[in-house]
Image (tube, grey):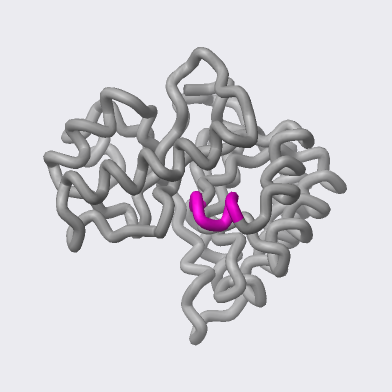
C-alpha cells in the first residue's frame, strides 16, 4: 500500500529511503503538558530524536513546551491550527488554518531555509488542498500507525504493531495527546528499548528529507 501511495503521490514522504537501522518517531497533536514533557524525557534518556507535528492552538497555549521541543534538537511540523479534517473543510478555510499554525510556529522560532514539514490531521486532505500545500511544505505521512488513540487498544498491542511493521526508514506515528497518553507512553518505552537493542537509532526527519 505504501509503495502504491508513494507512486501516486511522489511528493509525499511515507518512509525514508535508507538501508541503515534508523527509525523516525513522530508525534502528532501536541504540545500539551499532560503528555509532551514525558515524551521528551523518554527521548532524552534514550538519546533519541523525534519529529513533532504540532497544533497551532496548542503552541499558543503551551509555548514553553514548544520551545523545549526545539531546544532539545527535535524537528517540528505543521498540523494545522485546530486539527482540521480536510475532507470536511473548504480549501480556503483549510489553507487559512494551516497558515495560522505557521504563524504560531514562526512567532516562537526562526524557520530554516528549507521547506517546513506538514502532516494533515487524520491523513486527510482534498486534491486541491494537497496541490496548494505541496508548494509550501514537505508533506509527511507514515508507514507505521500505532493507533494509540484507540481506547479499546492496549499499549502492548500498539507496540506489537510497531514491532511487526517497522523496518529501516519507517516513519512511526504516536500522539502526544491526553487521549492517547495511557497507551502511547508505555508503547514508546517498549519501542525505544526493543529497537535500541536491535541496533537502531531514532532520528528526526529534517535531515533526511
Q: Residue furthest right?
A: 45
Residue 58 image offset from top left, x and y in percent: 57, 57
51 horizontally vs 123: left or right? right
- Residue 122 included in the magenta stretch of the image: no
Q: Which residues are magenta?
A: 55-60
The residue at 51%/24% (across/down) is: 18
Question: Can you see residue 156?
Answer: no
Residue 111 image offset from top left, x and y in percent: 56, 23
2 horizontally vs 79: left or right? left
Compared with residue 138, is residue 68 higher up or lower down, i.e. above or below? Answer: below
Name the foreground residue: 52 vs 12. 52
Q: Residue furthest bottom?
A: 152
Task: Tell me the chief SS of the magenta region.
Answer: helix
Which picture quadrant has residue 52?
Answer: top right
The residue at 58%/21% (across/down) is: 207
72 horizontally vs 31: left or right? right
Compared with residue 101, is residue 32 higher up or lower down, i.e. above or below? Answer: below
Residue 138 image offset from top left, x and y in percent: 38, 28
The residue at 59%/40% (across/down) is: 51
Residue 91 image offset from top left, x and y in percent: 16, 46
Compared with residue 168, is residue 126 higher up or lower down, i.e. above or below? Answer: below
142 horizontally vs 4: left or right? right
- Residue 58 included in the magenta stretch of the image: yes
Amino acid at each position: 500500500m505504501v509503495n502504491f501511495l508513494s507512486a501516486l503521490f511522489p511528493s509525499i514522504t511515507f518512509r525514508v529511503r535508507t538501508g541503515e537501522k534508523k527509525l523516525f518517531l513522530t508525534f502528532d497533536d501536541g504540545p500539551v503538558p499532560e503528555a509532551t514533557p514525558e515524551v521528551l524525557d523518554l527521548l532524552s534518556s534514550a538519546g533519541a530524536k523525534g519529529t513533532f507535528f504540532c497544533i497551532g492552538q496548542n503552541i499558543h497555549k503551551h509555548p514553553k513546551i514548544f520551545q523545549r521541543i526545539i531546544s532539545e534538537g527535535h524537528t517540528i511540523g505543521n498540523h494545522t491550527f485546530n486539527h482540521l479534517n480536510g475532507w470536511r473543510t473548504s480549501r480556503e478555510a483549510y489553507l487559512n488554518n494551516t497558515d495560522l499554525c505557521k504563524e504560531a510556529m514562526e512567532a516562537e522560532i526562526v524557520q530554516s531555509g528549507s521547506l517546513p514539514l506538514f502532516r494533515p490531521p487524520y491523513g486527510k486532505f482534498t486534491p486541491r488542498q494537497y496541490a496548494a500545500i505541496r508548494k509550501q511544505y514537505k508533506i509527511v505521512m507514515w508507514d507505521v500507525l500505532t493507533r494509540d488513540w484507540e481506547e479499546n487498544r492496549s499499549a502492548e498491542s500498539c507496540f506489537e504493531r510497531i514491532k511487526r511493521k517497522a523496518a529501516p526508514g519507517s516513519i512511526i506515528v504516536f500522539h502526544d495527546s491526553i487521549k492517547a497518553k495511557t497507551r502511547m507512553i508505555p508503547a514508546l518505552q517498549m519501542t525505544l528499548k526493543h529497537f535500541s537493542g536491535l541496533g537502531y537509532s531514532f532520528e528526526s526527519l529534517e535531515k533526511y528529507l
